[in-house]
């Protein structure tokens, strides 16, 4: 995506900077002539925010990253549950002909499907909100593009049914941990 044209006067007194300057500090700490704080506001962004106020603004300390970790947790729990179901099914065939384990499996598959439906909506939203918080936080050394990361998360859910979302979520949470120390 092309960035808008850059005018020479755009950077005057705005504190804007390139994304490559992690840990940006312009030295303007204190107060302006009218008494407003200078140098303590979030860093300006170089992306156009198409969502605007439709989604909440969060801080880096918010818990939106829980929704990013949730598909990973669901995958691990589903994997363990599938293994336990297979073992239980082998024993249940001898006892009841498999009726008990199949009924339990259908119940748990329905619950996992409902959780997956909620995650398919919340995962891209959480990636966008959390990436926007990281991008605007002055203490963050990583500045992900919220639009790009939100679209990758949406494509990972819609096109690949969470297949890409698991490695993407692990990558995102690792980079977030390196940048701000959480999770």
Image: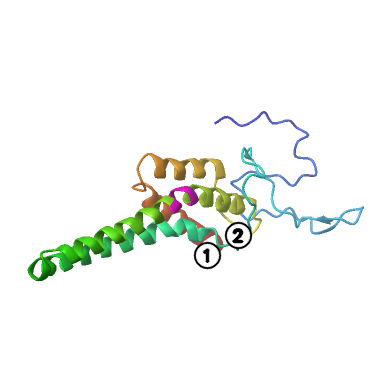
Whether pointer 2 and pointer 1 mark residues with C-beta atoms closer than 8 Å, the reply is yes
- Quadrant of the rendered structure where residue 108 is? bottom left
Residue 12 is a magenta residue: no
Q: Which residue is at a point 52% across and 52% down the rendered structure image?
A: 126
- The residue at which mark 2 appears reads as 60
Q: Main secondary structure of the magenta part?
A: helix
Q: Which residue is at a point 26% across and 58% down the rendered structure image?
A: 106
Q: Secondary structure at mark 1?
A: loop
How many marks on residues? Answer: 2
Q: Position of residue 71 (x, y in %)?
A: 40, 56
Q: Position of residue 143 (x, y in %)?
A: 57, 49
65 to the left or right of 108 = right
Magenta stretch, residue numbers: 118-122
Q: Which residue is at a point 47% across and 56% down the rendered structure image?
A: 68
Residue lying at the far right in this picture: please name it: 34
- The residue at which mark 1 appears reads as 182
């Amino acid at each position: 995506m092309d960035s808008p044209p850059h005018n020479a006067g755009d950077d005057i007194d705005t504190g804007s900077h390139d994304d490559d300057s992690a840990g940006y500090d312009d030295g303007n700490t204190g107060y302006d002539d009218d008494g407003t704080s200078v140098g303590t506001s979030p860093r300006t962004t170089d992306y156009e925010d198409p969502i605007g106020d439709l989604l909440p603004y969060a801080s880096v300390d918010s818990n939106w990253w829980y929704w990013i970790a949730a598909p990973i947790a669901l995958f691990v729990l589903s994997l363990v549950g599938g293994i336990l179901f297979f073992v239980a099914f082998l024993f249940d065939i001898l006892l009841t002909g498999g009726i008990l384990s199949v009924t339990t499996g259908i119940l748990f598959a329905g619950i996992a499907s409902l959780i997956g439906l909620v995650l398919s909506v919340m995962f891209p939203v959480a990636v966008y909100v959390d990436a926007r918080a990281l991008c605007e936080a002055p203490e963050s050394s990583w500045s992900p593009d919220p639009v790009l990361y939100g679209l990758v998360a949406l494509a990972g859910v819609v096109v690949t049914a969470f297949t890409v979302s698991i490695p993407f979520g692990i990558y995102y949470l690792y980079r977030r941990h390196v940048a701000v120390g959480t999770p």
